[in-house]
Image: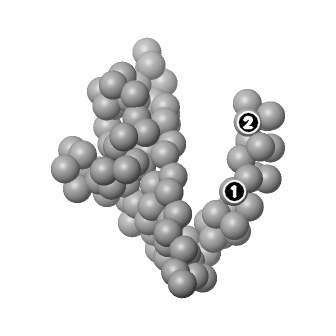
Amino acid sequence: MAGLMKCFRTKEKLFIGELKHADDMQLTITDGRDASKSLLKLLDKKDQDGTLVSSFINGDGVTYTFLLVVSQNGTAVGVSTFALEAEFLE
C-alpha cells in the first residue's frame, strides 16, 4: 500500500494539492444514474455492488470529479475503489 500511495502522490500531485482546500466538499450517495458515465466505465462489475459516492473539486483551472465505491468486508467498511477524472479549462 505504501508504494501505491507514493505513486499516487507523485502522479496526482496537483489533485493532492487541491484536496488541501476542499473543506466544503459535498459527498453524494448515488445510484449511478447521476454519476459520471466515464467514471462508471472504470468500475468492475463487482465494484458496483457497493455504495457509490460521488463528488468534485473545482480547482484552479481544473475540475476533478471522482467516484468512490464504499464496500463492507466482514465487519470492516471502507473505500474499495477510487475513480478520478480531471477536466482542464482552456
Q: How are the residues colored?
A: one colour
Residue that label 1 marks? 12
Q: Secondary structure at mark 1?
A: loop
Q: Does label 2 or label 1 sit earlier along the sequence?
A: 2
Residue that label 2 marks? 4
Q: Which mark is residue 43?
A: none
The residue at the far top in this view is: 74
> Up-down: is 70 above or below 30?
above
User: In which quadrant of the rendered view does residue 40 lie?
Assistant: top left
Is 36 displayed left or right of 18 in the figure?
left
Give residue 75's position: percent from left, percent from top.
44, 19
Amino acid type shown at disc 1: Glu
Give residue 11's position: percent from left, percent from top.
73, 53
Report the Cα–Cα distance between label 2 and label 1.
12 Å
Residue at 43% over, 44% down:
68
Is 80 displayed left or right of 40 in the figure?
right
Using the image as rendered, state which of residue 77 and residue 10 is in the foreground: 10
Is 44 displayed left or right of 29 in the figure?
right
Q: In this rendering, does residue 83 appear at all?
A: yes
Give residue 2's position: percent from left, percent from top.
79, 34
Q: In this rendering, does residue 69 appear at all?
A: no
